[in-house]
Image (cartoon, helix red, strand yellow):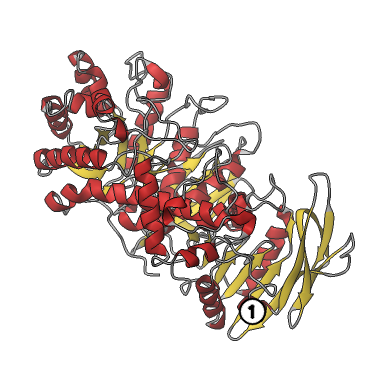
Amino acid sequence: MEKHRTYTTKADFLLHGGDYNPDQWLDRPDILADDIELMKLSHTNTFSVGIFAWSALEPEEGVFQFEWLDEIFDNIHGIGGRVILATPSGARPAWMSQKYPEVLRVNSARVKQLHGGRHNHCFTSPVYREKTQHINRLLAERYGNHPALLMWHISNEYGGDCHCDQCQHAFRGWLKEKYNGNLKALNDAWWGPFWSHTYTDWSQIESPSPIGESAVHGLNLDWRRFTTDQTISFFENEIVPLRELTPDIPVTTNFMADTHDLIPFQSLDYSKFAKHLDVISWDAYPAWHNDWESTADLAMKVGFIDDLYRSLKQQPFLLMESTPSAVNWHDVNKAKRPGMHLLSSMQMVAHGSDSVMYFQWRKSRGSSEKFHGAVVDHDNSPDNRVFQDVAKVGTVLEKLSGVVGTNRPADVAILYDWESNWALNDAQGFGLQTKRYPQTLQQHYRTFWEKDIPVDVITKEQDFSAYKLLLVPMLYLASEETIARLKTFVANGGTLVTTYISGLVNEHDLAYLGGWHPDLQEIFGMKPLETDTLYPKDTNHVTFQGKTYQLKDYATVLDLHTAQAEGFYQEDFYADTPAITSHPFEKGKTYYIGGRLEESFHRDFYQALIEELSIASPSDVRHGEGVSVQVRRAPECDYLFVMNFTEEQQPVVFASAVTDLVTDEELSGEVMLKRYEARVVERKR
């Protein structure tokens, strides 16, 4: 890949700021005046405005109040700042719910929801679609040419579903289109004869429900697909006036991650949603300093999510929300320790973010977010630790403008698939608590992160041909189209690794008959016979290249045809049978890992592949465990982010001369990194 720049907005600097809610303070002009002064002191430059502000913009139906927003725009522009203007559809005003109750959702138990919360709206509702498009048009007409406008932030953290009559009708229409009006095709895809679930009329179909049908896996899978498509349809309806009136202003919406294990958000298929955005942005809230994993383990997971969201469009992304200290919705809301805010911010930039943005700018005085972290605390002071940490990040970001628009070329890719995860989680088999598809991918990612080797986390529709090595762990659902693309990748010289519980069902979640798909048998030179699921206390062991590794959770019994056995099970009825295989196929090669093995196996296995395929890190910095070096590549130089994710001082060795972009020091040889320290250096070519 070329080392070019891709500017995702018109800004040639790193964005720093966050969600600003002046609509909560309209009766306090002194607070609003303080905000502008504090923005300057905090070295922030960009603010997301208007999220959840509908009741302030339209307090009564048809009565609009934009004057306060005019002033906010002008004040931010007056200090050289930029505005990311949000559409207010994430939460509707009470008058709308009262007058148009059809805009409110019905849950899967068919209970109509009351007004309240947020995202409690039906994506199908014609009324809500008309209302959102109307106010968005007014916003575009009023602010589309304002010099401070940088980007549109569409709604906020889309998610959830609605099961109202309108959505049932839309779902049936979606199914008719998907199955070309052929009810038999739908029944075949959903395996209708099971439990006498054959439909004889489209009107009989209902969305999955705890008071109805929830065990037809094809139905469940198609409902999730419909929910993604209907959410995208709502999004597309929202942006019609924005595309018409402000075609040069990019649009985004903030993606999410599930936070305890830090895995990709599961309710929507972001691989589909990404195609409709100009820029990917996401909200990152890792539980730093938790008591169940090391700081480096958590940093690895953050890197995985970053690389997934960056790879969705193969360009820089934006960190739209983070916290400068604690959140208020983890089980334990621990404050970031000194140094962690700068370190965690630099990690985001290192993996491809062109921003560090926060929720929130100023703490709310009341309700559920009054103790959520913010740049400005209730003390309204620039002198507290958190504000000073934010200001320090701002001063560092101001020195890193050369990073903007640069990317991270990779020879290695991992395939992540939302649909496969949905189907696997629905499968009533294996270990209900040990499937852990996203976490398994992160474990295969770990070795490359530890060795500073860039990885693209891609989806099944993306181009495989650019990579030397493609990892496809636990791809439970694999369509014939995906299998054909994997076969082509290997035939053209690629190296493919897959694992247990892969390629078992097609795109309708129907099991392949006759064993593994013939194309998979051909390229891997073997077929899986059965998968043994182990209890949590069970273990087995596998030998590989003279070493023995512990196995947990899953072990697949294999029937080799032309494959080479590389490792063997040591215990149980399949002792001494192949556990790991390799197989040359045309110009490429495949590997199959039959069981879930410990981390040390992944390190040894992937190190051998790294050497075999001549895969190299773009970094020449030597370091120990817990230090990560990530590189963003520009046409004329490399930007190296050297980060200590440990609680101890760590030595690093610069093999070539570099310039610290923050201190202007020339560095070479050994340098000591303090606990949680990050250094950003430039290496000329």
The residue pinned by badge 1 equals: 518
Is residue 681 among the parts visible in the rendering? no
113 vs 458: above or below: above
Q: Is residue 588 left or right of residue 246?
A: right
Residue at 82%, 62% in the rendered image: 542
Residue nearest the observer in this picture, 324 or 524: 524
* Image quarter of residue 567: bottom right
Residue at 89%, 59% in the rendered image: 572
> Where, quadrant-wise, is the N terminus in this rendering?
bottom left
| Place of residue 574 in the rendered image (x, y in percent of width and height, measured from the top left) | 86, 65
Residue nearest the observer in this picture, 445 or 458: 458
Q: How many marks?
A: 1
Q: Is residue 131 left or right of residue 532?
A: left
| Place of residue 153 in the rendered image (x, y in percent of width and height, measured from the top left) | 27, 42
29 vs 326: above or below: above
Residue that sits furthest to the front in the current view: 200
> Where, quadrant-wise, is the C terminus in this rendering?
bottom left
* Mark 1 residue element: helix
* Image quarter of residue 74: top left
Residue nearest the observer in this picture, 384 or 439: 439
Is residue 221 among the parts visible in the rendering? yes
Residue that sits furthest to the bottom in the current view: 586
Q: Amino acid at mark 1?
A: Pro
Q: Is residue 124 left or right of residue 533?
A: left
662 vs 364: above or below: below
Q: Residues within 10 Å of mark 1 (few under 14, many from 20)?
A: some
| Place of residue 309 in the rendered image (x, y in percent of width and height, measured from the top left) | 43, 52
Residue at 42%, 65% in the rendered image: 179
